[in-house]
Amino acid sequence: MENKFDLLVIGFGKAGKTLAGDAARQGKTVALVEQSDQMYGGTCINIGCVPTKALVHSADVFTAAGNDAAQQGAEAFSKAVAFRDKLTGAMRAKNFEMVDSNETATVITGKAEFVDAHTVKVSAGNDTLELTADTIVINTGAVPVMLPIEGLRESKYVVDSTDFQKNPELPGRLAVIGGGPIGIEFASLAANFGAQVTVFEAAPKLFGRSDQDVADVALELLKDQGMELFAGVRINKVVDTENGVELHYQDAEGNEKVWSGDRVLAATGRKPATEGLNVEAAGLELGKRGEVVVDEYCRTNQDHIFAVGDVNGGLQFTYISLDDYRVVKDQLFGEGKRSVKDRVAVPNTIFITPPLASVGLTEDAAREAGKNIKVGVKPVAAVATMPWAKIVKQPKGIMKFVIDADSDQVLGAQLLMPEAAEVINLVAVAMRYGITASDLRDGIYTHPSATEGIAEVIAAAK
């Protein structure tokens, strides 16, 4: 095998694998290095978006069927994990084929580290291989953060989000440290399968990026699932006992308390995966969180080296990684004009039941910015023109739009409702291309659907 390539991609994530495929189809010689054969395709299809949402969907189907979680939840969870494993296995094989089937592309499995700005050493056991390339793309993603809490790393009952989703045994009593999207999603699906779930969040409130009225409805939904939720908490230590595990913590009022259970999920965020890459040898700059520092074109301080996806410190979404790919593709094969600064109205979704999706400014943020706004907000159950929520037996939720009263532009939306992950994309496109709130209000939508509720809520704005 030739050790000199036109393009070397480190990591099989969304941006890198797509760029590798494009380059290979143009006849460029490409090497894609991935440290684990269990991660072909990247985080999203193996331990992130796809498998976790498969578990969420399985939990929703289980509860919608009216099953007795106490009697059938553990077995249903085990089956859901088996389906998750089958799905990820198939997608992993397909992703490998999509790159390796190109005549000029080579997938190499091993741990990569820089030797210099153009050379990368790949190690697999006792074997090493040095590769050089004209262009290098760092695409190593992110890894879970494990906070420096006494006993956390040592406990045999503590897992991260990767370990939790692969274990077919549903814990009877689960503590989740971290009330962000990852923690809340896992807490919700576990509760739907019948686990007794307690969430501990260090911040003063849960759903802190939502307006309080939206957060209140989301919290009510989670409590209806039987979950306990605590904010403003400090975890002091984790202790393994003869019967399981204990969390010793201080609540928001400063009282010392102890939680006892079967398993602890540490879901306190993810950090850029740069450890072991030896980026210093390439002369690259790292930021405060360990991210590879890049400019608006995803280019590092070495002109021929790019960093894409979670590793460059941006928003940790697969669709952001895909847009990083578009930016770098334009640099390498296009006009070089596309930039991360072009991004407007990037949506996000927390996959609880129903999902909470948002885009743009909250009401609080808009008022703080001095905007002259109108706000349209309604409980989902009160949106008469959207029977879809009642049809799918999810009438609890809230829809909220923040509108610029002067320009009639949508400034933001928060949707806690069935199909929110889909509807928010329509709102984001409207914001991105200047479609007014009135245009959305007067749109023609299929019936019954989740989308049609937009018209009634916007019409109620004042």
Image (cartoon, grey):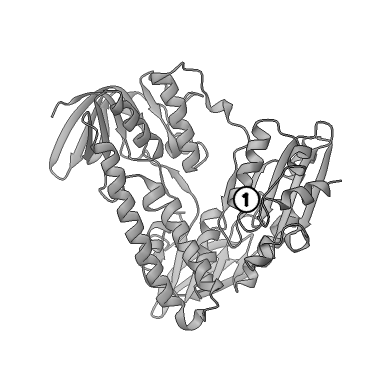
Q: Is residue 87 left or right of residue 309?
A: left
Asked if residue 299 shows in the view, the reply is no
Residue drawn at (38%, 20%), measured in percent from left and top? 302
Numbered-mark total: 1
Q: Please, what secondary structure does the residue beneath circle 1 have? A: strand
The spot of residue 81 in percent (x, y) is: 38, 66
- Rendered image quadrant of residue 106: top left
In terms of image quadrants, where is residue 271?
top left
- The quarter of the image holding the N terminus is top left
Q: Is residue 96 above or below residue 296?
A: below
Q: Is residue 410 visible?
A: yes
Judge from the rendering whether residue 294 lies leftward or rightward of residue 412; answer left or right: left
Q: Who's the residue at 59% across and 63% down the image?
A: 353
x%, y% of residue 276?
Answer: 30, 39
309 is higher (above) or lower (below) than 90: above
Name the foreground residue: 455 vs 427. Answer: 455
Q: Nearer the viewer, residue 142 or 257?
A: 142
| Residue 433 position by quadrant | top right
* 10 Å crowding of disc 1: few (<14), some (14-19), many (20+): many
Residue on which disc 1 sits: 357
Q: Along the line of sight, which residue is nearer the eye, 19 or 307?
A: 19
Near-viewer residue (460 or 171): 460
Of all residues, the one furthest to the right in this rendering is 462
